Image: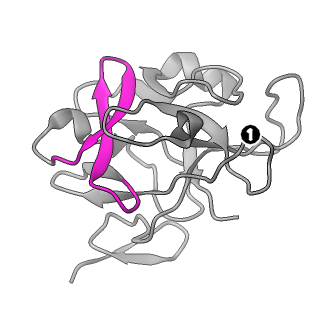
Amino acid sequence: TTQATTTNGGTSNGNGGAPLDYYPIRLYWESGYYWQETYSETFWCIGCRNDNCYDGTKMYLDDCRDGREKQRRPRKFRMEFQNNNEFLIRLKDTNLCWRRDGLDIHLDGCNANNGRQLWKTHPGSGVGLGDKFELTQDGIESRCVTQRHHPKYDEEVEIEWCWQARPDETSFWNWYTD
């Protein structure tokens, strides 16, 4: 079995350094970020509106933490690597993966032969626990998965121009491990 080393020292068997287990995907945050008129740390993860994840569901921001008023439970995903460093992003306990539909990101039956379901990171991005990464697709590398501006609950997660998301620090993601 092939082992890939992550930039934070962990290993995973043939999965490009990504964790083999499922974790929520969190909008990367670091000290100094100023979102929604505050420097306080935020915990925005990718999820489904009203906690309903099914074939065709669009992706939205949700609170990652347990016990929060609007939070149901953080949805967990993993990267399943295919060829050429591309991967499916699978929802735990389902056969549903992310699929790009125009700018929108929906869940759809996993199909590694569907190019709109194959994702990758920009060169130099690690995908191990503790790494931050930008998600994009082959042929549209100037676009990133984001909600584009200062994040808040229930905003659509889409694939937008990276240059629009970077000034507000909303083009990077990481695995939420709390």
Q: State left or right for residue 67 relative to residue 25.
A: right
| 92 displayed left or right of 147 | left
Give the vertical position of 99 relative to 65 (above or below).
above
- Counting from the top left corner in percent of width and height, residue 158 is at 45, 25
Say which quadrant the N terminus sits in.
bottom left
Q: Quadrant of residue 127?
A: bottom left
Residue matched to label 1: 70
The front one of 78 and 143 is 78
Percent position of residue 79, x then y: 35, 57
Residue nearest the viewer, comparing 160 with 141: 160
Q: Is residue 90 above or below residue 145?
A: below
The answer to whether residue 28 is left or right of residue 59 is: right
Residue drawn at 79 percent across, 27 percent down = 35
Which residue ends up furthest to the left in the rendered image?
Answer: 113
Residue in the picture at 38% in, 29% down: 105
Determine crowd level at label 1: few under 14, some 14-19, many 20+ residues with C-alpha closer than 10 A. some
Q: Tell me where residue 55 appears, x and y as whole percent.
A: 31, 38
Residue 97 to residue 32: above or below: below
Which amino acid is tagged 1? Lys
Report if residue 98 lies within the magenta region: yes
Assign the magenta stretch its main secondary structure.
strand
Q: Quadrant of residue 51?
A: top right
For the record, the magenta segment spans 91-111
Could you tell me which residue is drawn at 44 percent across and 71 percent down?
21
In magenta stretch: residue 125: no
Say above or below: 15 vs 156: below
Residue 149 appears at what percent x and percent y? 65, 20
Q: Is residue 110 left or right of residue 155?
A: left
Quadrant (top left, top right, bottom left, bottom right) of the C terminus? bottom right
